[in-house]
Amino acid sequence: MLYALGTIAAVAIVLFILSFFMNDRMKGIESQIEQVSMTMMQNNYQMKKKMKVLEEELLAEDVTEEIMKQPAPKPETSKQLPLVDTVLSMYKKGYKPHYIAKQTNLSEHDIQSLVQQQKSEGVQ
């Protein structure tokens, strides 16, 4: 009986020591899942960024088309150039200066100058 208990204890100790040297299969699977998760999150972030840029471009194009479809004011009553009207109209609708500059082929500085000039004249 004593030999049986000694043998069982020896086998248990040997198996316990071997367990430290064995590869953990779960660690490999966990790292793979984590890697896939990170890749998916990166792809999701990039897609959202691209969608945001596309939506802003489409909105800017729609506004430009809408402004271009509006009848032109009579030259006698209009004190401003059509491009200035376009810039101010887009600014009033909430578009940022860099999108307005992109659509009107002006620099951001020109857009900001026009807006500041109109604000100083009291027209907003």
Image (cartoon, grey):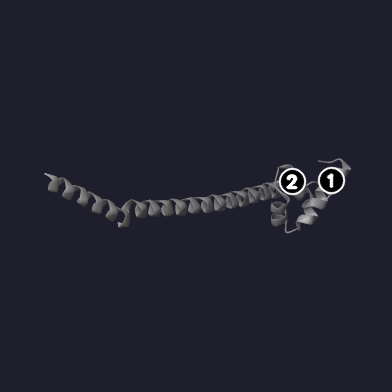
Q: Residue at x 74, y 46 (%)?
A: 91
Tag 1 residue: 118
Circle 1 packing at 10 Å, graded few (<14), some (14-19), many (20+), is: some
Quarter of the picture holding the C terminus: top right
Q: Quadrant of the N terminus?
A: top left
At 63% across and 48% down in the image, what residue appears? 59
Mark 2 highlights which residue?
91
Residue 105 pos. (x, y %): 73, 59
Numbered badge on residue 82: none
Q: Is residue 40 left or right of residue 101?
A: left
Q: Amino acid at mark 1?
A: Gln
Q: In this orientation, which residue lies closer to the viewer: 106 or 63?
A: 106
Q: Is residue 78 visible?
A: no
- In this view, the residue in front, 64 or 117, is 117
x, y percentage for residue 98? 71, 53
Image x and y of residue 84, in percent = 79, 51
Q: Are marks 1 and 2 in contact (CB under 8 Å)?
A: no
Residue at the far front: name it: 2
Q: Label 2: how many residues lie within 10 Å, few (<14), some (14-19) or many (20+)? A: some
- Counting the numbered discs, the total is 2
Residue 53 is left or right of residue 70, and the answer is left
For label 1, the SS is helix
**How far apart, in angstroms, are the residues tagged by discs 1 and 2?**
11 Å
Numbered disc 2: secondary structure: helix
- Rendered location of residue 20, percent (x, y): 32, 54
- Relative depth, front residue between 83 and 120: 120
Mark 1 or mark 2, which has the lower sequence index? 2
Residue at image coords 60%, 50% = 58
In the picture, measured across the screen, residue 30 lies left or right of residue 13, that is right
Q: Is residue 45 visible?
A: yes
